[in-house]
Amino acid sequence: MSRVVALIDGEHYPPVVRFALDALGREHDVVAVAFAGGTEKVDLDAGVDVYGAPVVFSSTVDEALAEAIRLYEPEVIIDLSDEPVLSAADRFRLASLALGRDVAYRGADFRFDVPPVALVTDTPALGIIGTGKRVGKTAVSAYIARRLKDAGRDIVVLAMGRGGPAEPELIRGDEVALTTEDLLALAAQGKHASSDNYEDAVMSRVTTVGCRRCGGGMSGATFFSNVPEGARLADSLGKELLVLEGSGAAIPPVASDADILIVGAGQGLPYVRDYFGPYRLGRADAVVVASAEEPIASPADVAEMIAAIRGQREDIPIAVTTFRPKPIGDVRDKRVFFATTAPKDVLPVLVEHLEAEHGCKVVGASPHLSDRRRLREDMRASEGLFDVLITELKAAAIDVVAAAGVEAGVPTILCDNVPVSIGGTDIDDVIDHVAGVALRRAQTRKDA
């Protein structure tokens, strides 16, 4: 029988609650109840022995539930409360609290389980998770990999994606430099040659293991993946540190010793304040707020996002960043077409940076790298004007952009997306700090 803490309120008549607890007791070990509030049908001054189990009270329902979990170590919280004591938003917050303590949360017509951990690796593991897609997680991951490599750490990146390989794929990016021609050959084999593991290998020149996943739950679980198999492969390599790269809002089903959370500044407050934002934030050891500049996010938007994070995690390190393109080949004095997944409104900023910092002339650009039809239209509009293609290694970079380059007889140069600190803790300091935390915690668990 599973150990259960029931969440109750005073808007239900106590004998009715006892009736429900007795019914629960036939299938579960009800070790305690946490009182969520409400006074209409309960006289607290008369005592609470009627519930037949220890009752945990506190000034807030969050504190009561946290204390009940600490004292009674349940496997599941069963919510017997209702409106008006608990709203849907309250329940997501309480579910985040429970999941963050490895406890499932269940109600009358819903159940949230702790995202499964299929494997604990011997290799110390640093997780990189996001609040959604297109927040810059892969670009930050690649930068983290470079930073760790430059610091002399021997690492392997385990990346999972919606276009990943059928079998975990090992790429010795530290030994072999993948070219655009190599990626085109992979695409010709039916592989998604712009998948995250290729971006990590190409941009950071580190060992990577690529995996696939399908489906993502609200708290980060995946429906199907081959990540556990990939993690076993990565763990067998004898590396100093394993970097676990999530996919969108999905979290790798492998235990991490520390986590960095990537938040898109333009996503809005609900991504950190509501739903399972508090759960992801609760498991993080540092936060990177990405794309934190206009027109994506105003200074007021960024300030509100930071305040929402600080309201839940007062002392957590926060790096405030934006992105700038960096071609990995020489484009000076070239006429270029630039393809990116960045929003259309950001395109002028990125074009200006390319021209000012890399000495090229941008004769055409497209923010539609993830929309093949519109990307082709943008490229046709600049046909004959460019002598070099520049593209991020994402979405249609290989099967459309690089393939068009071959047809037109012009080279394709891949472009890194570099995070640049513009506020808060410097991103390099965040990386160094969290990597150190991961290594120390891993040593502690090995010594235990």
Image (tube, rainbow, N blue to C red):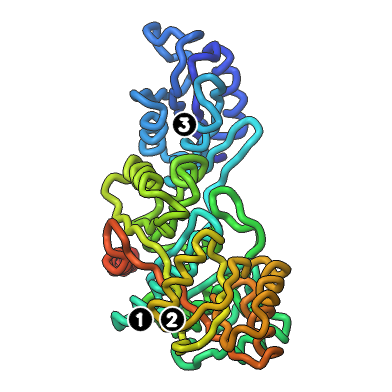
Of the residues tagged 2 and 3, which is closer to the observer?
A: 2
Q: CA distance from mark 3 to mark 1?
A: 49 Å
Q: Is residue 309 above or below residue 186?
A: above
In this view, 96 is above or below 361:
above
Residue 149 is tagged as 1
Which residue is at a point 29% across and 69% down the rendered structure image?
Answer: 428
Give the CA separation, mark 2 to mark 3. 51 Å
Q: Amino acid at mark 3?
A: Val
Question: Is residue 58 or residue 436 the one in the foreground?
Answer: 436
Whichever of callouts 3 and 1 sits on the residue coming sooner in the sequence is 3
Q: Which mark is residue 31?
A: 3
**Crowd class of label 3 (few under 14; some 14 to 19; many from 20; radius 10 Å):** many
Where residue 241 sits in the image (x, y, percent)? 38, 75
Q: Quadrant of residue 206?
A: bottom left
- Picture coordinates of residue 22, whole percent (x, y): 58, 23
Residue at the image position 64 percent from the left and 80 percent from the top: 401
Which residue is denoted by mark 2 in the rendering?
A: 204
Amino acid type at circle 1 is: Lys
Q: Residues within 10 Å of mark 1 (few under 14, many from 20)?
A: some
Whether residues under marks 2 and 1 lie with C-beta atoms below 8 angstroms apart, the answer is: yes
- Helix or strand or loop: what does disc 1 sit on? helix
| Relative height, residue 230 to residue 409 (above, below) | above
Tag 2: amino acid: Ser
Image location (x, y in percent) of residue 442: 34, 67
